[in-house]
Image: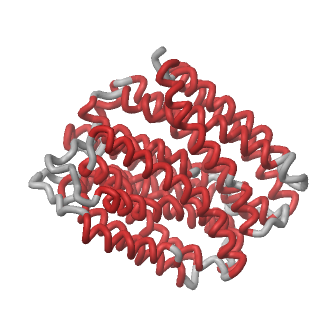
Amino acid sequence: MNVAAQQNCDRAIAAGVPPCPDAASAHPNLVLATTILASSLAFIDGSVVNVGLPAIGRSLHADGGALSWIINGYLLPLSALLLLGGAAGDRFGRRRVLLAGVMLFALASVLCALAPSVGLLVAGRILQGIGAALLMPNSLAILGTHFEGEARGRAIGVWAAVGAAAGALGPLLGGWLIDVTGWRAIFFINLPLALAAIWLALRYLRNDAQPDTASLDIAGAALASIGLGALTWGLTVATSSAGLHWQSALAIVVGLVLMVLFLRAERRAGDKAMLPLSLFRSHSFSGLNLMTFLLYGALGALLLVLPFVLIEYDRYSASTAGAALLPLPVVIALASSTMGKLAGRLGPRLPLTAGPVIVAAGFLLSMRIGGGSYWTTTLPAMLVIAIGMAVAVAPLTTAVLSSVDAGHSGVASGFNSAVARAGGLFTTALLGGVLSAHGAALLDGFHVAALACALTALASAACAFLWIGK
């Protein structure tokens, strides 16, 4: 999924965190640098691995289903545990949980870099996802507790801008490293970032352990993780060359049952739930999250398959394929602020309806990709998709916060961010067959996926039009 777009889902988490009484830090810039370095681990790895999939597949002899799991191994725990990671920071201290997340991410990156098999690489990606679920919400919450007023807004803006730049350069840098030294280098680049974040956190972040002894929603997190995992595995196998059989069908059924049990567990937990179900009494909140799931699912599918097609079918180098994606985060980063201001005057319904429609037009343009010039096929599609996402992402954050009361703004924005990742999780699970194809079959599969993404984007526009108040 696109990094600049993700950050607009994430950044509002900090808005729901009250500042500490001594929020004026002696080293505010170093506090900001700590959170940027920590979150950059998740943002860079969330984008750079897509460019490395063809090289990983050749090196480890991985089929399309295994390649899907290299992505979903990361997205699955990040989607399921993001809210739990924020709650853990509230209870055990945000600095402590941030440090735990960064350390786990660094160790997992070493495992990924040295993995001799696909199974160990996927295991490393799962550990990376758990680390990201711990560090992501707490990096933003730390900004909320160390800054207040206009300083908080500036800090979040800098965090978002630097993160967007890192995410935009990630595929380009990763592609260059793959071409020069091999795919394992894309995981080693996490280590200096992690070491710097750990050193700064120990030195400049205050110990903010909380006296709150409320229990964490472990049962909810377990049901969500196992349920999403079963669904993802079942869908991945069903859409691969193996097809739908009793094992994959059983996994899908078990996943659905566990997700129902998750909702029952959350209802019983009440206000102590990881996801308070009272939020869904707001029709706007429900519609916005369904819209997010569909729109970001479509975008995640494109960003997974497009570089794969450019490398495998059009014979781009990894660095050139990474550069081909650059217009998307750049346009979103440059235009989102202006669109946020415009949406403040127009209201969220119009941009959240128009943005996905523009994105759908971009997906239809992407059906021309394959065998032609980058400037007349790939670039126009990327620009149109980027414009559509820029129209939608900033109003989406504002609308999510406005759809619930102020006391639930943190969990609402965190859940919306988790839903965005879950959208990419499920679409990746459906693309195993495309990633297993070669030649003309690969291009045909990509074009079918692009058409499906266009229809999904139009469905997200319908959700916004029908369920968001005027």
How many labels, in total?
Answer: 0
Q: Is residue 165 left or right of residue 260?
A: right
Residue at the front extreme, as displayed: 26
Residue 99 is situated, as x and y percent measured from the top left of the image, at 30, 68
Residue at the top extreme, as displayed: 470
Residue at the right extreme, as displayed: 372
In which image quadrant can residue 186 be found?
bottom right
Q: Is residue 219 above or below residue 437?
A: above
Residue at image location 42% in from the left, 75% down from the top: 106
Q: Residue 260: tell me if it is visible.
A: no
Residue 379 is situated, as x and y percent measured from the top left of the image, at 78, 47
Q: Residue 15: tell me if it is visible.
A: yes
Q: Is residue 429 left or right of residue 378?
A: left
Residue at image location 47% in from the left, 80% down from the top: 110
Q: How is the image coloured?
A: secondary structure
Q: Is residue 114 above or below residue 89?
A: below
Residue 195 is situated, as x and y percent measured from the top left of the image, at 39, 76
Residue at image location 43% in from the left, 47% down from the top: 418
Q: Is residue 345 left or right of residue 34?
A: right
Q: Is residue 106 left or right of residue 89?
A: right
Toward the viewer: 402 or 252? 402
Residue 164 is situated, as x and y percent measured from the top left of the image, at 53, 52
Toward the viewer: 159 or 365? 159
Toward the viewer: 124 or 154? 154
